[in-house]
Image (spheres, grey):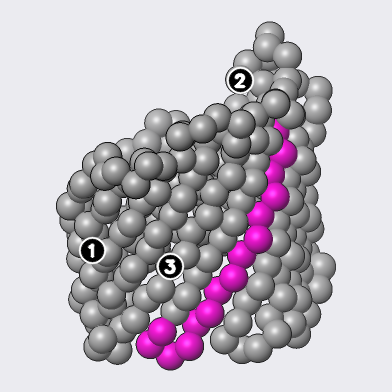
Amino acid sequence: KLQVDAVKTPALMDALIEFGFLEAVSLRIGQFKIPFSQESLISSGDLDTINRSQPVSKTSPGQDIGASGRDIGAVIFGKTSVIEYTLGVFNGAGINKADTNKEKDWAGRLLVHPASFLTLGMSLYDGMFSPSANIPPVKRDRAGAEIAVLCDAFSFKGEFIQAADGEIIRKGWYLQAGYFFRPKTLQGIFKVDSYDKDKKTDLDRSDVWTLGLNWFLAEKTKLMINLELTKDESGKTANTALLAQFQAAF
């Protein structure tokens, strides 16, 4: 697989080779998305809201350093009837970059499907990060839990992420519910996410409330409208935004 983005710089996003030995054990090598967080792994064109939640965009590996959730590495992955897993090693420096320290980062994600409509999961990331080769690395660890319920017209998704960057502990979560008022055509979305950028600092948490409407003209051709309310830890509204996005797939 080779994927480029003609708008972003650098343009190369994915460059990978997969070896499918068995359904339970396969190998992926190259540059690709780090197996952490259900929302981080969703393509931008398939998101239910225009923006990703704060905890995912600010703490999920690869999203936190502006690398679109990607890195250079290798993973083994597979699935059985009710379990999916991915386990791998990465440089930790981001896309299109050589490793900036002597350490390697480890990532893993485990999903369990106890029922056809229910997915439960957890993700772990253990790493050391250096912005450049001449800067000593600092701890960059993450842990996450997730749930997804997809049942006919109704959907429910949620995640919790805790991150350690050196001595700073960050944490956040989101809950999202969706409903198709017209099958595969008109979908309503309600989402709330919360992000605390430093557990030891007071009054630095921000919450974003999103009310969205998605109109699907085809499978991936859609118009999205989002109303976002951003509140600080005291509950005061810090920002209100009305967003609209149209995408066409062909």
Question: Is residue 143 covered in magenta?
Answer: yes
Cα gap from disc 3 to disc 1, whole angstroms: 16 Å
Cα gap from disc 1 to disc 2, whole angstroms: 35 Å
Q: Quadrant of the C terminus?
A: bottom left
Q: Secondary structure at mark 1?
A: strand
Left or right placement of residue 42 versus residue 87 in this view = left
Residue 217 visible in the picture:
yes
Give the residue at mark 1: 224
Q: Earlier in the sequence, mark 3 or mark 1?
A: 3
Q: Earlier in the sequence, mark 3 or mark 2?
A: 2
Horizontal and vertical percent position of residue 131: 61, 20
Q: Which residues are magenta?
A: 140-154
Where 135 falls versus 68 (above or below)?
above
Q: Quadrant of residue 41?
A: bottom right
Cα gap from disc 3 to disc 2, whole angstroms: 33 Å
The three-letter code of the residue at mark 1 reads Met
Alpha-carbon neighbours of circle 3 within 10 Å: few (<14), some, or many (≥20)? Answer: many
Secondary structure that dominates the magenta span? strand
Give the residue at mark 2: 131
- Which mark, by number, is residue 167? none
The three-letter code of the residue at mark 2 reads Pro
Horizontal and vertical percent position of residue 123: 70, 56
Q: Quadrant of residue 152?
A: bottom left
Q: Nearer the viewer, residue 140 or 83?
A: 140
